[in-house]
Amino acid sequence: MSKTFECIPNFSTSDPKVVKAILEEIRCVRNAHLLDHTFDTHYNRLVASFIGDEDSILHAALNSATKAIALIDMNKHKGQHPRLGAVDVVPFVPIRNATMEDCVELSRAFGRRLAEAQNIPVYLYGEAALRPEAKDIDWVRQGEYEGLHEMIKRPGREPDFGPKKPHPTAGATIVGARRIMVGFNVNLGTPNLEVARRVAAAIHVNKGGLVDVRAMAASIPEKGVTQIGMSIGYFEKTPLYRVLELVKIEAERYGVPIVGAEFCGLVPLQALIDVAKYYLKVEDLEEDSILEIAVQKALEQT
Amino acid sequence: MSKTFECIPNFSTSDPKVVKAILEEIRCVRNAHLLDHTFDTHYNRLVASFIGDEDSILHAALNSATKAIALIDMNKHKGQHPRLGAVDVVPFVPIRNATMEDCVELSRAFGRRLAEAQNIPVYLYGEAALRPEAKDIDWVRQGEYEGLHEMIKRPGREPDFGPKKPHPTAGATIVGARRIMVGFNVNLGTPNLEVARRVAAAIHVNKGGLVDVRAMAASIPEKGVTQIGMSIGYFEKTPLYRVLELVKIEAERYGVPIVGAEFCGLVPLQALIDVAKYYLKVEDLEEDSILEIAVQKALEQT
């Protein structure tokens, strides 16, 4: 059984032509499958998701990163999401028959090859981190692209691969291995970014909020709303309903309602099952309770 | 591509030995796959779900019905769910590469063979009905087992197959074809059956409630609660959250809370997606947004 990995690179662009060119580098790789992509102007960021075996995932990750470094000039980049470079972060996730150790190895191989080929500094984070602080992506991203020139010289902040100075147009890249996580953005019915920042802080793991949940505030002027952009690290332990209800409670302090939400990237089935269980007050509901899943499993036995 | 059908027979028993014997008749048929079964003493009813191709589904349906007719004596049967016989209702549902017409044909073939082999009256309902009133299973079941002897003689109420009198121990069987539907039971935090009946009436399609939703009240004395047992005919048009929220609103009139819920049988994925969309306030969420579904589809292309 071949191993299947997911790669979810984040690129600092929302230019449709650049997006198209980057995605094409993924699509044209044999046995790599683009599952999803989202991009928008307020974050000025493209998040792609693709799967493949070890060779095809490495190939597609390298080719798409190379294209992004060629086309994106970080000196002109503005966006509300913190970022260090054109290819901001490249996580690898084990999907089928693959372990976290496989992903750590794969991500380090990718980081080394990208750094050598593009002469760009690469930091390892998450499960692939070589120093404890770097497990936390927020620590790695401190100072962002604009502060990188200064930060990279500080003791203990040397990149894991590549030169000890930023790439002139692409900054640095953060590479790592992690579990499946859920990207979940909730819109608040206020244009007041200060309110959104306070709500985001109340949710964030490092500021007294929910364990393994990261939250940031952003403004979406064209909709007249603000957004709490969140990543939920252990959706099995901290289900989506708990995150949403806590955002609701914190926003209520300011008389602000939740006016919408969206997933960033794909959502694991178990996360949806946990939502249904909570709101429908159902105790027993599992994957095998779902008709399509039960049918698929039964027919695979035939 | 062979056609796949689902059959969801409802048997009037909750005796574990009888349940086991009936299920064994399904399990031992080659290419028939038992997906799920539930039974409980308050309804005194077993609901099984299995899939298979045309031959195996017919085979498993006939064998399990024959076993139930042999083992169940309706003269001793008590239960809160309305029923006409030992094998109360046998619906067939198209799952893959099968049409409703296939299911109508299959259900009529099953009904004819069961009636002949067991000398039991069989009524066709749903899409397989031969008279308009019989599309509605409530009409077919009027008078229940206890009234069958009298009802079966009335003009226009002749069975579609078999003798014009009840089977002495197994009553009659209702057979038909229908779409996938959702069985959803909600528990009210009151032992007061009259309150539960009023709430059920408020939800039922024939009593001013939601279109294609059938609701009945039952008592669950061991838990000190009552239950609204519902079948939702078009879960895509009338999503589960609307049903649940309406039950909540109607129960609030009597100061009664919802204290739990359960699915009867398997639940279609789309029904869970619609629940998540509503409660999480997400607009865009579809099957392909789910990681496991997207991965499965991508790997099938390889």
Image (cartoon, coloured by chain):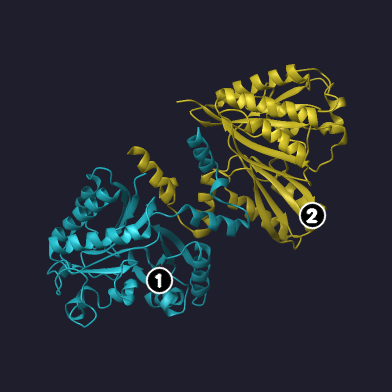
Chain colours: A yellow, B cyan
Element on which disc 1 rests = strand
B33 is higher (above) or lower (below) than A175: below
- Whether residue A178 can be seen here: yes
Which residue carries the number 1 mark?
Answer: B215
- The amino acid on which the numbered mark 1 sits, given as a three-letter code, is Ala
Nearest the camera: A112 or A271? A112
B154 is higher (above) or lower (below) than B176: below
Left or right of residue B107, residue A192 in this image: right
Farthest residue, direction bottom: B155
Left or right of residue A25, residue B2 in this image: left
Nearest the camera: B292 or B15? B292
Seen at 62% across and 27% down, the residue is A127
The quarter in which the C terminus of chain A is drawn is top left
A122 is higher (above) or lower (below) than A208: above
Left or right of residue A91, residue B251 in this image: left
Q: Position of residue A45 (x, y in %)?
A: 75, 40
- The amino acid on which the numbered mark 2 sits, given as a three-letter code, is Val
Element on which disc 2 rests = helix
Between the residue at mark 1 and the residue at mark 2, the CA separation in whole angstroms equals 45 Å
Left or right of residue B67, residue A269 in this image: right
Q: Position of residue A160 (x, y in %)?
A: 73, 19
Q: Quadrant of residue A205?
A: top right
Q: Position of residue A191 (x, y in %)?
A: 81, 57
Nearest the camera: B227 or A92? A92
- Whether residue A126 can be seen here: no
Nearest the camera: B104 or A185? B104
User: What's the chain of the residue with tag 2?
Assistant: A
Seen at 12% across and 69% down, the residue is B168
Q: Position of residue A31 (x, y in %)?
A: 55, 29
Which residue carries the number 2 mark?
Answer: A195
